[in-house]
Amino acid sequence: MNVLKKIIFAFFILLVFPTVIFAAPVIKKPTPKTPIVATKSKIPVRVDTSEIESKIHAKAYVVIDRSTGIVLTEKNENLVWPIASTTKLMTAQIVLEKKESPKKIFGVLTEDDVGGAKLYVKNGDAFTIDDLFYSMLVGSANNAANALARSTGLTREEFVDAMNAKAKVFGLKSTVYVDPSGIDPANVSTPMELAKVADEAFKNVFIKKYASTPIRNVRMVNTGTIKKIQNTNWMLTKPAYNNGIVVAGKTGYLEESSWNFVTALRPKDNNAKKELLLVIFGSDSRAQSFADAKTLSSWAWKSYTW
């Protein structure tokens, strides 16, 4: 009797629910897991929460991952500050837009001398445009900057107008230029805005070349005299401050600004994905500005992974 009941029950199931037995099974595909190392993302991820602020002496600074524009750390990033000779990064861009031949010979005049760092020359001593660029961006010579501005054929007022017009193109609201050399403390910007100027400047292969040269011999064309120019950026010339590869950089100093520094750096393995853009305002000494840059860049490469 039990056997008969089982047969009747099985027959009933086949009649009412045939698909339970004979339908094709549904095969579920496994849900793909995100690989631990799926793609090499360029976005920096914080892996170390240690602070850096207490170790930095500068008045203001910003450290930016250059490939993404992500700010890694900052202090007073919107502070309006005299930018001193970092002004020359904008001067270089305006001069290069005129596309003068680097071999063109141009004289430095007495009127170009506004004090500060300079080429020690007599009125009319001539250099190639190329050597004037080296003098301006390696040695930070103010008279070289003013001579280059004159080489464009623009008046001083027209040249400064072009600098400010370019700042507007970059969308900079707090950046003001009043002279090509940076000797006037009324040349001002913020760490965030100067970072934009520097980023654009360092994209130019000529500026990048000039601003990463440790030492350059320039030749006075009319006399044949050779002048040795050493970069004001100690990260290029003093091993104590060298913790990576300097892609480009520019220093600036006035009594009103103390020591400013802007640079693009890569770690020693030259990994372009880890390139940093640093702007430092108001370090209390020349040496401290480079020490701050070294400390900030070392911290960034330790605290983030790419």
Image (cartoon, helix red, strand yellow):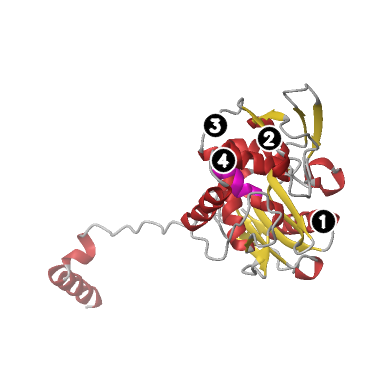
Query: Quick check: marks 4 and 1 in contact, CB under 8 Å?
Result: no
Disc 2 target residue: 132
Query: Which residue type carries mark 3?
Result: Glu
Q: Which residues are magenta?
A: 88-95
Disc 3 target residue: 100
- Label 3 or label 2, whichever comes before in sequence order: 3
Disc 4 target residue: 95
The question of residue 192 being in magenta is answered with: no
For marks 3 and 1, give the one nearer the viewer.
3
Nearer the observer, 268 or 188: 188
Looking at the rendered structure, the secondary structure element under dot 2 is helix
- Label 3 or label 1, whichever comes before in sequence order: 3
Looking at the rendered structure, the secondary structure element under dot 3 is loop
Query: Which residue type carries mark 2?
Result: Leu
Query: Which residue type carries mark 1?
Result: Ala
Query: Quick check: marks 4 and 3 in contact, CB under 8 Å?
Result: yes
Query: Which residue type carries mark 4?
Result: Val
Nearer the observer, 214 or 278: 214
| Residues at marks 4 and 1, CA–CA distance in whole angstroms | 32 Å
Disc 1 target residue: 291
- Which image quarter: residue 28? bottom left
Q: Residue furthest left?
A: 15
| Residues at marks 3 and 2, CA–CA distance in whole angstroms | 12 Å
Q: Position of residue 223 (x, y in %)?
A: 78, 22
- Label 1 or label 2, whichever comes before in sequence order: 2
How crowded pointer 2 is (Cα within 10 Å; few <14, some 14-19, many 20+) is rated as many
